[in-house]
Amino acid sequence: MAKTRTYYDLLISCPSDVKEELEVINESVSNFNRMFGRINNISIDTKHWSKDSYPQSGGRPQELLNQQFVLDCDAAVAVFWTRFGTPTDEYDSGTEEEIEKLIQSGKQVFLYFCDKEAKLSDVDWEQYQKIQEFKEKYKHNNIFSTYSTLEELEKQFLNHLTLYFLDKHVKGGEEPLEPKSELSIKGVSNGEPIENMKVTKSSFSNSEFITHLNTEIISQFDSIKQYHFTSEQEETYNKNSWPTVTLAFMNGITKEVAVSAKKQKIICDFAENNNIEINKISFFDLGGLKQKESQIITGSVTYVGTDKAKEKLKEIERLFDNIKKYDQWVSYFEKLDSKYYLRLCLSNQGNRYDEDIDVKIFIKEGLLCKPEDIPIPEYQIIEECEKSILPLFQDKPSLSINGYDEYPIEPHIPVLPYFTVEENAKQLKAKFKRRLNNIFIYECYNQNGYDILTFKQSYLKHKNNVLFPSIILFNSKPDSVRFEIQSKFSSEIVTSEIEFN
């Protein structure tokens, strides 16, 4: 009597270092068909690129494989050991793309990670790291298993095949979920997406960095206080410091060195503000140090005096420079600490990727701190700020949230040397502003009492999050922020309004 048999296609997707496992998988499928398939009138056929693909032109290789047989499979089994595979145009490997595409389509994926030992010389650590990141991504979904021996894999896989396909057959098969994206905006905290968005303030002014600078300057005061000049030293200076033979035309203008009134005031103000006691006369005493300006070489100055006096002058000059930098850091950090910060990411928790995603953020007029309103540091610290502070505006990617990677290419415009301090400072500030604008890439509009920020995310995988191009800054704390999201695969505009406590 004729019987109706149901056939299921099982995709085998494994990187090149997994060879013995392929035999285990094929043997397990054969055992399933022999022990369970025959009496239940079902059969599992395996599909693998080595036997089920054919030469074809007109597209990227992985996409052609997807069209030929991958996307028609009812389920897949994937095994990772030390290699993640060869990258495709959209994913870090062909195996990852096949897994992602099938999950997006609501298909079953049997995913296994091998824990058996490997020769260190055979391990590509970059590939291995990608496996760990992929594993971390799915650890909360409970869709994978691990094994240490081939026997353990065989036992697990046959059991999983049986549980899934017999249940599927008894229920008459389940329709795969309709592929769709599910876009939303989430907050970011400690590298993790959070539902409850928070507006925060920075505390740069109370940072260890500022404390360390302050401590270093105080220690400099203590060091300078140790310099004492006696009449004996001055007498030695008078006898030995001046050359006995000079040429008249080489003699320059000689005058006693003194710390300027401006520098003294800045140093004394710091001492007063930090409860440092100093004797102004002895602290700035340079032991009769003099300077000679050459009449031949313009700007050439020679100091005449004891080595100790010269060292003290250098220490005072260094103290002044450090106090000036410290004051600039404090002033800059106070300005940053007066702002409010909102860290956001774009999330897709659907079962398919999405493209051409347009995001709009509606903020009540007057609250937004626009790029042109972000404080610019002063000359002495601007290069350090460019390296250490600017990156903080972008937030850091993590295992849970990808970084935004569609910034415009920054043109290299060098800061030209041999300018005056004022001209050099002007160049550095212009460079800082250019870099700011390449981070805060939002288009900004004003309409109906709102400042509206917009940006585009060209692509976002399913079950993935990506950071906004930058942290959003406010001059005053907002009560709420409204969002609109449009995309290629969403038929409706996604809207939400977030209220802040």
Image (spheres, rainbow, N blue to C red):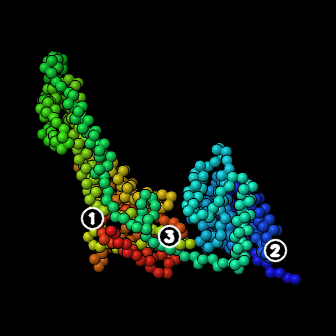
Q: Nearer the viewer, residue 288 or 126?
A: 126
- Mark with earlier residue (3, 2): 2
Give the spatial CA distance, label 3 vs label 2: 42 Å
Point out the image quarter for the N terminus.
bottom right
Q: Position of residue 63 (x, y in %)?
A: 63, 69
Image quadrant assignment for residue 216: top left
Q: Position of residue 260 (x, y in %)?
A: 14, 38
Q: Position of residue 363 (x, y in %)?
A: 32, 72
Q: Residues within 10 Å of mark 1 (few under 14, many from 20)?
A: some
Which mark identifies residue 171?
none
Query: In the visual, does 7 lie left or right of 91?
Result: right
- Dot 1: element: loop
Which mark identifies residue 475?
1
- Mark with earlier residue (1, 2): 2
Point out the image quarter for the C terminus.
bottom left
- Callout 2 amino acid: Ile
- Callout 3 amino acid: Asn
**Residue highlighted by disc 3:** 348
- Callout 1 amino acid: Asn
**Residue highlighted by disc 2:** 39
